[in-house]
Amino acid sequence: MLKIENVEKYYGSKNNVTKALDRISFEVQRGEFIAIMGASGSGKTTLLNCIATIDTPSAGNIFLDGVNVTEIAPQDLARFRREKLGFVFQDFNLLDTLTIEENIALALTINHVDAKLIQHRVHTVAEQLGIEDVLNKFPYQVSGGQKQRAACARAMVHKQSLLLADEPTGALDSKSSKTLLEMMADINRRIDVTILMVTHDAYSASYAGRVLFLKDGRLFNELLKDTQPRQAFYHEILDVLALLGGDISDVN
Amino acid sequence: MTLTKLSLRNARNQTSDYLVYFITIIIAAALIYAFNGLVVSNEIQGLSMTMQNLSYIIVSASIVVVLIIGWLINYTMRFMLTKRSRELGTYILLGIEPRKVAQMFFVENLAIGIVALGIGVCIGNLIFHALHAAIFRLFSTAHTFRFSFSVQALGLTVLYFAVIYLFALLKSRKHIRKMKIYDLIYFEKQNESAAIKKSKSRKRLFTASLLCGIIGTALLTTLNLKTNLIGAVLLIFFLYGFFMSFSSGIPSYYEKRPTKKYQGHKLLTFRTLSSKLSTIGVTMATIALLFTATLVAEGSGMVFYTQFQRQSEMVTSYDLLISSRSTSDFSRYEAYIEEHIPVRQSRTYETYEGDDDNISQHLLNNADYWTYLEKDTVLKMSDYSALRQMLGYEPVTLHDGQYILHCMDYLAPALEAYGKEVAIGGTLLTKGPIYTEVFTQYTWDGNGRGFIIVVPDELAGAQPVCNYIYAAMTDIAVSGTLYESLIALQPDTTDDHDMILSKAAQAEENASLHAMILFPLYYLSFVFMMVAATILSIHLLSDTAKLKQQYQILYNFGMDYKEMKKSLNRQFALFYAMPTIPAIIICITFLFSFIKVLDPGTIASTAQPFFIIGTALLLFLAIYAVYIIASHKSLKREVLPQQ
Ligand SMILES: Nc1ncnc2c1ncn2[C@@H]1O[C@H](COP(=O)(O)OP(=O)(O)OP(=O)(O)O)[C@@H](O)[C@H]1O
Ligand SMILES: [Mg+2]
């Protein structure tokens, strides 16, 4: 479904270049649940942004359902994003002036979903994520974890076929993390939503079917879960992280 | 880096954020300087006795202006303070004393103020010269341009500004000292806190304010000072009540109708607007109030202008007219005139009383008309022809057995409809043509009150005399001392004064009124308008960063560019329209009734009220448009993500 081909991304001017992505290539099948791990600054967010067409790669191609997203005309990009992609941003990106409920509903109104159905759908997702109590509050009135769950709810409420999540569990306690991850695994299994999730946390990554490791903008390693139980996969991930070294010290 | 340097750099950065504000302060300083220049100008004061009143009026207007500008500066300073609370809070957190921070903040603002004052005074000097020339034009006095700079006016302007800033200093210092670091850092996070929370009391307030609005507007149309004042108070209550209840009312309206909320992109518009309004409901009301004042002042100015224009035309068509009820002996004046006033052409004649007052009665019943004369007025054909020739009008003929009607233009339609015969000394005459050139018919001392019946000499001559008239066209303007000397020649009888009318004297009086009423009115309305529009723009532009972030998020979520543009435009339009709509409604109702009480005949056609009100609105909207376009451009460029 998704094919990344020699994607490169440079930031900065000629004499001061940061190479955020360095010839990355991989393929994702429909219905896969992939975790992306790597040290801070290794290019994870950049990769997600390129796939989401929020950023454009400096070189290389990204194919989604056979369409080269780097070649989509600017006027069609918006439509592409709202119909195909659900996105959880690292810094939540909730609108301050809207309540949590309205923030979640936004994903639906943008897609012109029938106004009568919206409230019900929002409430269902919110209930699953345990944030139904804060629906009528404004972002500045809720905690960081509640905001993060709201951002996830927004990304999942319309059930787009590709879900990109940038550290969706970063601000969550282990119980809320578990709920969220199970929900993601559930929509992944039941309705075939393909998921790419960035995480620093081996526990979260163990929910995925495959883990990609980035280092300095390069694809460093890849782990497959196959049939092994999650517990075993978790330890395997920890081993690779130890090998990677560097910044990931907060593994638990 | 020293603190002074830091604050000066901040001031420079701020200037671009608050460019509109900066320009408004410049223009305000310019206007204050220019008008105070008129007050202290000896030349202007020497133009006419009444011009001394201009000083009092302008000084009073300036006090109002200082209050309003003071409010603007204070408001903007407090506004910047909250917008920059995080920055200032960080300074305090880093250990700079709050006193120092307050001082720094004030130095920044003072720097902006001083620069604005400097530029303003330079521009003000140009405006002063323009006003100066305009006043001389009004008085038809030769004006030689001489560049001058008034130290007194500068002193007054600096004094006004010093008062404003001293006040602002005290207030902002108090404000900063009272602030806690927590509030400073978290201030900008708070966006929606409704002024009135209980929905029942809000509904009541909303209904009450609407009611007050309607009653207030109705009272404003009564044109009786007492009821007008009550009306004005009610309208103020209406504006504040309306904006306070309305702003907190929208969220609860949509809360109850979620389906409506999620239709199309209403959600964004309503939320941005309600979060704005709930914090600035009171400000919105003040802005609406200022707009109302602007429109009423501008519109009244237009009405007065029309009145003056029309009056100097209508009062007398002759350069000089002396009219008496009792005697045909004008010798006392003639001696003076012969000596001092070169006369091109003159005529002494009489107007006579008709047999009845049928035509006056007809007009009283069918037109906006008044009269104190008991009989219709009649004029000899020979006098009529001579007077027409003297005034340079086309010659006309009177057919046998007919009478001519000469009337003020606005009475013509009513007289067209009058077809009856007129009896003069028992002889019946049928109706002939009607003429409507200006013919000294505005008061009853000239050629009839509003109209005159022209008949053959022998018929008129047998009737009782109504007025004895001396009319002249002169080579010089009979104004100033010439006119005053003629007035002084009147006999000292208490009853039955002679009436002395001079076109030039009338024009001079109108010019003074013009200068005294119109200039201050426009001065005030201009300042009101600018201050209100500035505060609106500051509010909108200071939200640029927030809006930009919002639209970036929407863009990331795949909202269409077109839809984003539409949504932004809608928010923008609503924001600017909101305070103007009540102002326009109030102003239109007021002006229509104001026009109604003008002297009959001032308004020549039914289209004219619309023209006057239209011009006032256009003027208002033109200035408003400058602010709207400027902020719209910058907003659109900054806020919408690049495609
Ligand atoms: N807009 C930008 N301009 C310049 N450099 C950037 C920009 N965005 C990211 N970078 C740089 O690119 C590199 C990769 O950044 P990226 O945000 O992808 O890291 P990340 O893996 O998401 O890190 P983290 O785990 O801390 O979120 C970093 O070195 C970063 O400094
Ligand atoms: Mg990141």
Image (cartoon, rainbow, N blue to C red):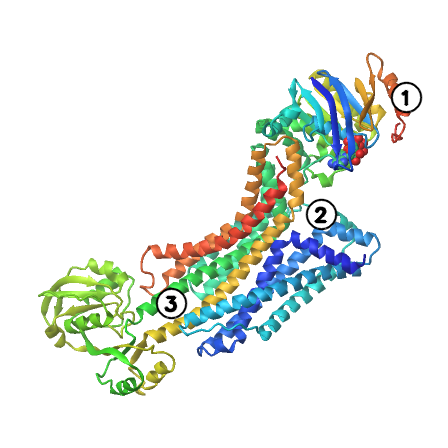
Question: Which residue is found at the position 66% from the left and 23% from the top?
Answer: A160
Q: Residues within 10 Å of mark 2 (few under 14, many from 20)?
A: few
- Mark on residue A239? 1
Q: CA distance from mark 2 to mark 3?
A: 53 Å
Q: CA distance from mark 2 to mark 1?
A: 45 Å
Q: Amino acid at mark 3?
A: Phe
Of residues A43 and B105, the one nearer the viewer is A43
Q: Amino acid at mark 2?
A: Glu
Q: Position of residue B67 (x, y in %)?
A: 60, 65
A211 horizontally vs B533: left or right: right
Report whether mark 2 lies on the same chain as mark 3.
Answer: yes
Q: Can you identify the residue that label 2 sits on?
A: B188
Chain name for mark 2 = B
Q: Position of residue B581 (x, y in %)?
A: 50, 50
Q: Above or below — where is B480 with respect to A44?
A: below
Q: CA distance from mark 3 to mark 1?
A: 95 Å
Q: Residues within 10 Å of mark 1 (few under 14, many from 20)?
A: few
How many numbered marks have been drawn onto this rendered protein structure? 3
B426 horizontally vs B452: left or right: left
Chain name for mark 1 = A
Mark 1 element type = helix
- Mark on residue B308? 3
Q: Which of label 2 and label 1 is nearer to you?
A: 1
